[in-house]
Amino acid sequence: MVKDRHVVQVLDNMIEDIIDSFRHASERDSSRKEGSFSFIPKGTRSNATTFIELREWLVNKSQWSGYARTAGASHFLDAGCGIGNVILTAKAAGLCRCWHGIEHLDSVYEQAVNLLRLNDRCETSACSRRDRIYVQPRNRETKVFQALKVFKGDIGTFTGYKNYDVIYYYRPFCCFDREAEFERRVEDQMKVGAILLAFYKQDYSTKRDSRFEKIPLESCPTAFIKVKD
């Protein structure tokens, strides 16, 4: 736990400075879609606390021990990822092994790509070529990383939610109807055993949905695991 508190503090100091330099870019972005929020990220400290708490829950809960043993190879998705800071926070907190994000704002998407490249260079400088964790994109057009990926796309029409083990979002739409439609889309597509971390959730029908069970996380009261289709 002392190590986890240190991780939270380091992340808080490092990533918040990065966020400040990117915060206003999406407000000037002409591609901003009607009804979606401009980039206002959730604080690094609260995210790191949630990710560490979920990681410990997966390890400690005996009824999910089978999932916990495979959690090291699991996939994390930030739906509406902004500059990608949440992706890096999940990685640093030790939650999952692959971290992906989707963002539709042009300038913010490019910033996310640049942030992941910056992280890639930092990781490379800290380890040998043989031990390197990441690989450079296959080509400049796809901007694909082996462990870290950011996609240019619309979370409202995305069809790949079923491929992820942990799905995170922080209310990406300001319009209630669009937000509720997005939330139901995610919940319908999620696979059994997948976990939803839904911050500032608007459609609370999930609490009454028999397909889901609530995960008792102090830092995220709207955390659920899908137990059946």
Image (tube, grey):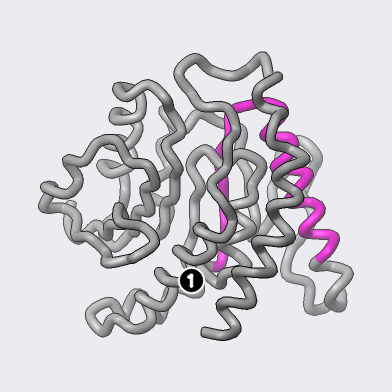
Q: Position of residue 227 (x, y in %)?
A: 20, 61
Q: Position of residue 3 (x, y in %)?
A: 60, 83
* Residue 113 painted magenta: yes
Give the residue pinned by disc 1: 52
Vertical relation: 44 (above or below) 102: below
Q: Which one is in front, 147 or 214?
A: 214
Vertical relation: 128 (above or below) 201: below
Q: Residue at x 76, y 35 (%)?
A: 141
Q: Residue at x 43, y 42 (%)?
A: 160
Left or right, residue 126 beside residue 92:
right
Residue 123 image-quadrant placement: bottom right
Q: Position of residue 19 (x, y in %)?
A: 70, 45
Q: Which one is in front, 200 or 79?
A: 200
For label 1, count other residues whose C-alpha is less than 10 Å away and answer few (under 14), some (14-19) or many (20+): many
Judged from the image, the secondary structure of the residue bearing numbered disc 1 is helix
* Residue 143 painted magenta: no
Give the number of callouts.
1
Left or right, residue 71 beside residue 213:
right
Left or right, residue 155 beside residue 137:
left
Main secondary structure found in the magenta portion: helix
Residue 45 image-quadrant placement: bottom right
- Dot 1 amino acid type: Ile
Q: Residue at x 27, y 67 (%)?
A: 216
| Residue stretch in magenta | 97-122
